Amino acid sequence: MSDEKKGFEEDYQNYLKDSLNEVSGLQSYSKEGQTEIVTIGKNLARRTNIMVSLAILLLVVPLMTLASYMYYATGDRANQLIDVAAKTIYVTEPNMGLEELRLEHKIGFFSMNINFDVFKRIGKEDYKVGSYDIDFLLNQPEFPKRDLILDRPLDEYPSKETEFMVHPKAALPFSAYTGWDMLKKIPDGSVAEIYVSLNQVMKPEELKESLPKNMELRWLAVDTGMDAAQVDQAGVPITPLGYPAQYDPTTWSPFKTDDNEKAFLEILLQLKNNEAVATKVARAKSLALGGRLAYIKKHGINVFGAVITGPTEELRKLQDLQEIRAVKVGEVKLWNWE
């Protein structure tokens, strides 16, 4: 072996011995120290995961919010859903309407909430009688949350015994026989809302001409071919369909027209095309709009009931009319007729 190679080997062995001596001289970590190191590592990993998750959320939330707004903006979907809900109230709830300025809506993650107040005309004034709160998941509504402040509200789940307007071919519920007596007991100097059932179906103009002058015809219940049975073909209870008898000058009303009959038919067609939404919003869980709309188009608009308001002492005079079969008293307010 050459001297050079032998010297290299000796240097390597010396270096190795020195390294081993240094390693053996190092103090090993105690059990507590090892635990502390592991804990620090876990905490660091946890903080890293939290920061990564927050970063992802900060990206996802704006994207989901933007996607939700785009969904309801596409095809003006939000306004269409609001429009269907509002028009359902006008044609399924007698003498009830709403004010667009009091309608609020809020869009969430692929959901929308709308809230609006509803009003009734009693005498010469419009009174707030409650509110509706409706949640939508995409374009599917939940059942509305109704908060009504009425003395005599319509039944939330309609049946033959609880309806306020009855077709001439349907049997009157027992409560309908007490309407005139109740009207007589209401003091003079008040105004009232009454639901009138007719002895026969008639044209809206014929009904208007038969009424005394000092009262106001507010809403007309239209004969749709199913009102005598009061149920649809599957036996599910239905409620009357109708429309306001008066011209409504408010800019947001669907009946700001001189031809409320035409507006009514157009609304029924719109609701038929959105029947799932309309049925959820309405009290009745069946509107049967296809068959009822076809019947109206074939036979024209004839009415079997109405809502009338005016001074109580004037409304009592309706008992003398042969056209009227029965009445039910709705809301009563202090005098406001002048």
Image (cartoon, rainbow, N blue to C red):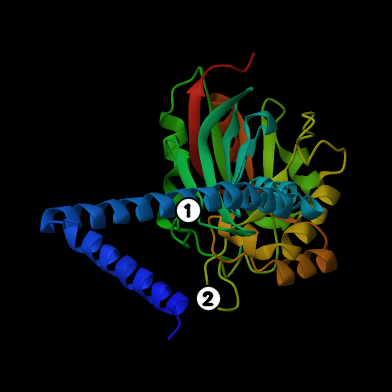
Q: In 3D space, how far apart are the residues under numbered discs 1 and 2 (Cα atoms)? A: 53 Å
Disc 1 or 2, which lies upstream in sequence? Answer: 1
| Residue 21 visible in this rendered orientation of the protein | yes
Question: Given the image, on which type of amino acid does mark 2 rest?
Answer: Gly
Question: Given the image, on which type of amino acid does mark 1 rest?
Answer: Ser
Residue placed farthest to the bottom in the image?
1
Q: Which of marks 1 and 2 is in front?
A: 1
Q: Where is residue 29 in the image (x, y as percent from the top left)?
A: 17, 57
- Find disc 1 in the rendering and name its residue: 53
Q: Position of residue 20 (x, y in %)?
A: 25, 67
| Residue 166 visible in this rendered orientation of the protein | no
Judge left or right: residue 321 versus residue 40. Answer: right
Q: In which quarter of the image is the N terminus?
A: bottom left
Find residue 321 and report its image quarter. Answer: top right
Density class for disc 1 (Cα within 10 Å; few <14, some 14-19, many ≥20) is few
- Find disc 2 in the rendering and name its residue: 235
Q: Give the SS element for disc 1.
A: helix
Q: Which residue: 87% across, 38% down?
A: 258
Q: Position of residue 294 (x, y in %)?
A: 79, 70
Q: Where is residue 50 in the image (x, y as percent from the top left)?
A: 42, 50
